[in-house]
C-alpha cells in the first residue's frame, strides 16, 4: 500500500515528466498554440450546432452538420497521410490554419449580416471537415519531431489533457458568448484562435520531418501505408483491436442523449452530468498517463485498459440506477484516454519516420470515424432492440477480440516497445522548417 510520501513522489514524477516535455522549446510553442486552437474548435462546434438548430429546428440537420465535419476523413485520410509524409508538416498545418481562419471569418460575416442560410452553413462546415482531414495526420505526426523518443509518451499525454480540457472550456465559452453577445461573435472569436495558432506555428524552428519519395504515385504511397500497417507484427494487431473497440465501445458517448432521456429519465441535466463525468475521467486518465515515463510496459497497460473500458461499458448498459452508471462512465472515460494515448504512443514510436504521416492518418481515420460509425450502427439497432443491447453486444465483441490480442501480448510488446531501425523507402530525405 502506498504511503502519503510515496504518493507525493509519484505525483512529483508526473510533474517531472511534464517538465521534460516542456523543456523542448518547439513543443512549448506548439502546445501554447494548440491549446487555444482546440478551445476554438469546440467553440465552433457548439456554435454551428446552435446556428443549425436556430435556422431549421431540425434534428436531422444536426446530424448532417456532424457528418459534414467528420465524414470527409474517411475518404481523404490516405491522401492527407501522403501529404504529411511528402511535405513539411509545419507548412501543412500553417496552410490549414489559414483556411480555417478564413472559414470562421466568413461565417462571422454571414451571420452578422443575416445572410447565412442552412446550405451555406453546410458548405462551410464541409470545407472545415475537409481542411481538418488534411491537418490531422500532420498534427499527430509532428509531435514526434518536437520531442525526443523518451519524452514522447509524456508529450502525447499532455496533448490528451489539453484536448479533453478544451472540450469543456470551449463549449462553456461558446455558451457565454452566444448568450451575452451573438453567434457571429462566437465565430469571430474562433477566427482569432486560428490566428493565434498560426502565429505560434511561425515561431517553430529547425523542425525535422521525413519525406518518403515524393515522386511516386499518391495512390501507391497510400496503399504502401496500408500494406506496411497490415504486415507489421505490432502495429497491425494494435490497430485492429483499436478499430474494433472504437466502433464497439467509444461511440457510447454519442448515445448519451438517448440514455439520459429514455433510460435514466434525467433529461438535459442528466446528459450534462454524463458528458461531464466522462470528460473528468478522460482528464484523470491523461494526467495518470503523464506520470508514466518511457515505453516499457505500455503495451500491457493499453491492453489492460482496453478490457477495463469494455467492462465499464457493459456495466453501464446493465445499470438501471443513474448513480451507478456515472462511475461506470468515469472509468470508461479514463480507460479510453489511456488506451488512446498509449496506442498512439506505441505506434508513433514503432513506425519508421518516413511512414509516420500515413500511418497516423490511418490511426486518425479510425479515431474520428469509428465512434461515429458505432453510434450510427447502434443507434439504428436501438430502434428495434433498445439502447442497451446493441451497446452491450459491441462491448462483448470488443472483449472477445481483446482476448485474442492479449494471447499475443508479449510478442506485440517486443515489436512496439523497441526502437525501429531508421530505414525506409528509396529516396527518403529529411527537411527542416525554419
Image (cartoon, grey):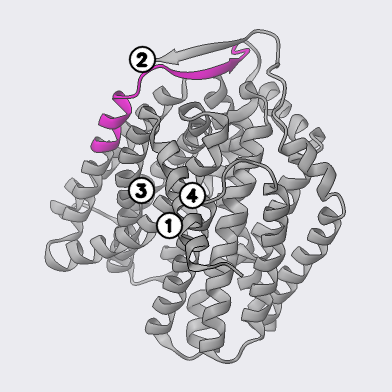
For label 4, the residue is 13
Of residues 412 and 325, the one nearer the viewer is 412
Whichever of callouts 2 and 1 sits on the residue coming sooner in the sequence is 1
For label 1, the residue is 164
Q: Report the side of 201 relative to 419 (left or right).
A: left
> Where residue 47 is drawn, which disc sits there?
none
Mark 1: few/some/many CA within 10 Å (<14, 14-19, 20+): many
> Where residue 434 is drawn, which disc sits there?
2
Q: Nearer the viewer, mark 1 or mark 3?
A: 1
| Kind of element beneath mark 2 | loop
Between the residue at mark 1 and the residue at mark 4, the CA separation in whole angstroms equals: 22 Å
Q: Give the quarter of the image for residue 214.
A: top right
Of residues 128 and 16, the one nearer the viewer is 16
Between the residue at mark 1 and the residue at mark 3, the CA separation in whole angstroms equals: 9 Å
Q: Is residue 430 above or below residue 250?
A: above
Q: Is residue 317 above or below residue 283?
A: below
Residue 6 visible, this angle: yes
Direction top: furthest residue: 427
Mark 2: few/some/many CA within 10 Å (<14, 14-19, 20+): few
Q: Is residue 220 above or below residue 323?
A: above
For label 3, the residue is 38
| Kind of element beneath mark 1 | helix
Q: Please tell me which residue is depicted at 73% across the width and 33% down the height of the picture.
A: 418
Residue 391 visible, this angle: no
Residue 348: image x %, image y %?
61, 35
Determine contact: label 2, label 1, CB under 8 Å: no
Q: Nearer the viewer, mark 2 or mark 3?
A: 2
Q: Nearer the viewer, mark 3 or mark 4?
A: 4
Residue 22: image x %, image y %?
39, 37
The region drawn magenta spans 196-214
| Kind of element beneath mark 4 | helix
Amino acid at each position: 500500500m502506498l504511503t502519503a510520501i510515496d504518493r507525493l513522489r509519484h505525483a512529483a514524477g508526473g510533474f517531472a515528466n511534464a517538465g521534460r516535455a516542456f523543456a523542448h522549446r518547439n513543443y512549448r510553442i506548439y502546445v501554447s498554440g494548440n491549446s487555444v486552437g482546440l478551445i476554438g474548435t469546440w467553440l465552433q462546434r457548439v456554435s454551428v450546432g446552435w446556428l443549425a438548430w436556430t435556422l431549421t429546428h431540425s434534428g436531422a440537420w444536426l446530424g448532417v452538420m456532424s457528418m459534414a465535419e467528420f465524414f470527409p476523413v474517411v475518404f481523404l485520410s490516405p491522401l492527407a497521410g501522403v501529404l504529411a509524409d511528402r511535405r513539411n508538416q509545419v507548412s501543412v498545418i500553417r496552410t490549414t490554419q489559414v483556411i480555417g481562419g478564413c472559414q470562421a471569418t466568413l461565417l462571422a460575416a454571414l451571420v452578422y449580416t443575416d445572410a447565412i442560410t442552412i446550405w451555406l452553413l453546410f458548405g462551410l462546415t464541409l470545407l472545415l471537415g475537409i481542411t481538418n482531414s488534411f491537418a490531422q495526420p500532420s498534427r499527430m505526426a509532428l509531435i514526434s519531431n518536437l520531442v525526443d523518443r523518451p519524452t514522447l509518451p509524456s508529450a502525447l499525454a499532455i496533448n490528451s489533457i489539453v484536448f479533453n480540457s478544451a472540450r469543456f472550456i470551449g463549449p462553456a465559452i461558446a455558451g457565454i458568448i452566444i448568450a451575452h453577445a451573438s453567434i457571429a461573435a462566437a465565430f469571430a472569436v474562433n477566427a482569432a484562435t486560428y490566428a493565434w495558432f498560426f502565429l505560434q506555428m511561425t515561431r517553430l524552428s529547425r523542425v525535422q520531418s521525413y519525406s518518403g519519395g515524393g515522386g511516386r504515385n499518391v495512390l501507391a504511397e497510400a496503399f504502401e501505408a496500408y500494406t506496411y500497417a497490415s504486415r507489421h507484427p505490432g502495429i497491425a494487431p494494435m490497430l485492429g483491436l483499436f478499430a474494433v473497440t472504437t466502433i464497439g465501445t467509444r461511440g457510447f458517448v454519442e448515445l448519451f442523449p438517448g440514455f439520459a432521456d429514455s433510460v435514466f429519465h434525467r433529461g438535459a441535466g442528466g446528459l450534462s452530468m454524463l458528458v461531464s463525468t466522462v470528460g473528468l475521467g478522460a482528464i484523470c486518465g491523461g494526467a495518470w498517463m503523464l506520470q508514466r515515463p518511457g515505453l516499457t510496459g505500455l503495451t500491457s497497460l493499453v491492453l489492460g485498459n482496453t478490457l477495463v473500458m469494455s467492462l465499464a461499458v457493459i456495466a453501464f448498459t446493465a445499470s438501471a440506477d443513474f448513480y451507478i452508471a456515472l462511475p461506470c462512465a468515469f472509468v470508461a472515460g479514463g480507460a479510453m484516454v489511456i488506451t488512446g494515448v498509449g496506442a498512439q504512443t506505441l505506434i508513433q514510436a514503432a513506425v519508421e519516420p518516413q511512414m509516420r504521416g500515413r500511418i497516423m492518418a490511418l490511426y486518425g481515420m479510425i479515431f474520428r470515424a469509428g465512434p461515429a460509425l458505432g453510434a450510427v450502427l447502434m443507434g439504428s439497432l436501438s430502434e428495434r432492440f433498445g439502447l442497451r443491447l446493441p451497446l452491450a453486444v459491441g462491448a462483448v465483441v470488443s472483449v472477445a477480440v481483446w482476448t485474442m490480442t492479449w494471447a499475443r501480448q508479449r510478442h506485440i510488446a517486443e515489436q512496439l516497445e523497441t526502437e525501429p531501425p531508421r530505414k525506409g523507402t528509396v529516396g527518403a530525405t529529411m527537411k527542416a522548417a525554419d
